[in-house]
Amino acid sequence: MNSIKLRLFIYYCIISFVIFGALGVFLYFSLESVVLKSVDNALNTKAKAIATLIAEDEGINFQFSDEILKDYSQNSKHYFQITQDSKIIEKSPSLGRYTLPMLQSAKTVNLRGEPVRIVSYDFFINKKHFIVECAQDIDDEIDLLQTYLGILSIAILVAIVLSALGGILIVNAMLKPLKRISNTINKLSESNLRYSYIDENVATELKPLATAFNRTFERLDRLFTKQKQFIADVSHEIKTPLSVILMETEIALRKQRSLEEYKSTINQIRESAHHIQAIIQTLLKMIKIENTQLLEKKPCDIKEIILKSISILKHELDKKHITYSLEGSNFNIEADQTLIMEVFLNILDNAIKYNKEAGTINIVISPPNKVEIIDSGVGIPKEAIDKVFDTFYRVDPSRSKHIEGLGLGLSLVKEILDLHNAKIEIESTQNTGTKVTITF
Amino acid sequence: MRILVVEDEKTLANLIKKGYEEEGFAVDVAYDGEDGLYLAQNNIYDCIVLDIMLPIIDGISILKKLREQNNSTPIIILTAKDAVQDKVLGLDSGSDDYLTKPFSFEELLSRTRAIVRRKYLVSTPIIKIDDLEIDTVRKTVKRANKLIELSAKEYTLLEYLALNKNKVLSRSMIIEHMYNEDFDLDSNVIDVFINRIRNKIDRNFGKQLIHTVRGLGYSLRE
């Protein structure tokens, strides 16, 4: 299963198992050595006592007092055995027919199926080699160690479980902010985007995530709002020509009309349909530009683009008897030629449309990156300048009958220039003219 | 019936005017908010059709200004804005009705008639005075169940008298109601119309319904 929680839990268990296991093993063996050492010490003392007795008799006679032998009676759990030059010369009654093995150091062996601890002590009397071995049943000690081992194992298991549970708690606490983030994202919809916010007061490690999400929310909200506004603008714009078509047909059908009236109705409907068509075409163009991620940028000759745009608009220029001039030296830009041409077509088109009869248009190219277009038109009122880039904005809507246009041009221009990191500025004096400055 | 249409889209404004005029209404048109407000303040209309997005002064401001000045002329908002909050804002600012573009002219017409009836406190489209019956939808007039043929202007005048039954209407009130401001008529024209209507609805029937109030004007009463 691919769960952070489960994995963290497993790691936690493994780590605590290793730590507590090692601790348990260490504790067990250290207790064992403590117990055996104390047994060994006691046995050593006894062996030394026996050795002293033997030394007192100079190794000839082995008469041990009853006091001592009482400890090693037949049913005692204590044993001794005395060896002289590898020959057993005396052993305790408790050993019966058994003998103790010869050992170099203290050791635990099996005697009659019971664990027995043996300690040996060797010495010389008159160049005779004596070894005294003392032994003791240690089943009680082994039992004690077994019990201790049992308790220790249970304690370690409990400790592992407890620390694992603690681990789950910690993991949960760590994952809580993530859960909050995912909850917020889960509840996300286009309508509550504006109010969606992840508390950025979280752990340092999670802060970049929260900040990134919040920024994404903002961006998406702006995008959605823009799109909603765009759709609202479009539907609003289409409603007017649609209303005209509906009115024309309804009124025409109310009663018998003359041929002339029918003709004028049909003409009006055609005009409205053309209007709708133009709106849709411009919209499609805008959508296409907005969707263009990769521009076909290549070096273009700015003067060439402007001259081409002018030649396309030649008919309109002549119709209004407008004269134009092109000044300044040339420069090149890295741009998508068709789109930049669209920019100049739109700006020049506006300069012609809103110009007076026999007006002028001056185009000044100033290297390295500036183009100014100055017309002698009606100008734009101060309060309207900021709004001219809004979709569908027209300075005076009632002028729509006289001047063909959709109010989409300048928002399209702005969109294209934004894509090229270029700037557009408009200065205008009413009834004198407008100056448009583009800086690439 | 005199109506003011405030709409910046000239083609549409002129079409609405044409439609209303063919229905016998007198129509003034304003293409921007300033003209619209001026006309509304200086003339008496039976109904104002008002767009919201207008040059110079927007529709909602016009509406609020008129209501502030205690002008209670019925107002129908006619706009492309169709969001609920726009409708609420429009109605709460004092409009009587709200119609969104694109609209059906028939609907605008029937809503206009309904609003005008409400203005004159008439609840049905058929106004009855004694045995005279005026159908404001079909624009037909009957007396004693006999259909009477009237010209468009004659009908308009009779309907106006009927909507204001038992009240005295002056000649200038009648002129302002019947003609838009392009006409500058002598009030004697009204006397001519009244005579023609009398000949058609009163002469051959026993009881006289149209009364002349000397020095004041005319009145239609039982």
Image: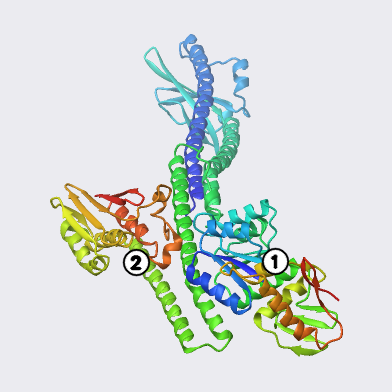
Q: Nearer the viewer, residue B195 or A43?
A: B195
Q: Which residue is the extreme one toward the top?
A: A56
Q: Secondary structure at mark 1?
A: helix
- Closer to the observer: label 1 or label 2? 1
User: In the image, what residue occupies the spot 62% across and 25% down?
Assistant: A73
Residue type at mark 2 is Lys
Q: Quadrant of residue B171?
A: bottom right
Q: Is residue A245 above or below residue A39?
A: below
Q: Position of residue A19 (x, y in %)?
A: 48, 36
Q: Is residue A358 above or below residue B111?
A: above
Residue type at mark 1 is Met
Is A345 on the left-hand or right-hand side of A265?
left
**Badge 2: residue crowd in 10 Å (few <14, some 14–19, many ≥20):** few
Residue A301 visible at all: no
Name the residue tied to disc 1: B173
Is A344 on the left-hand or right-hand side of A117?
left
Q: Quadrant of residue B215?
A: bottom right
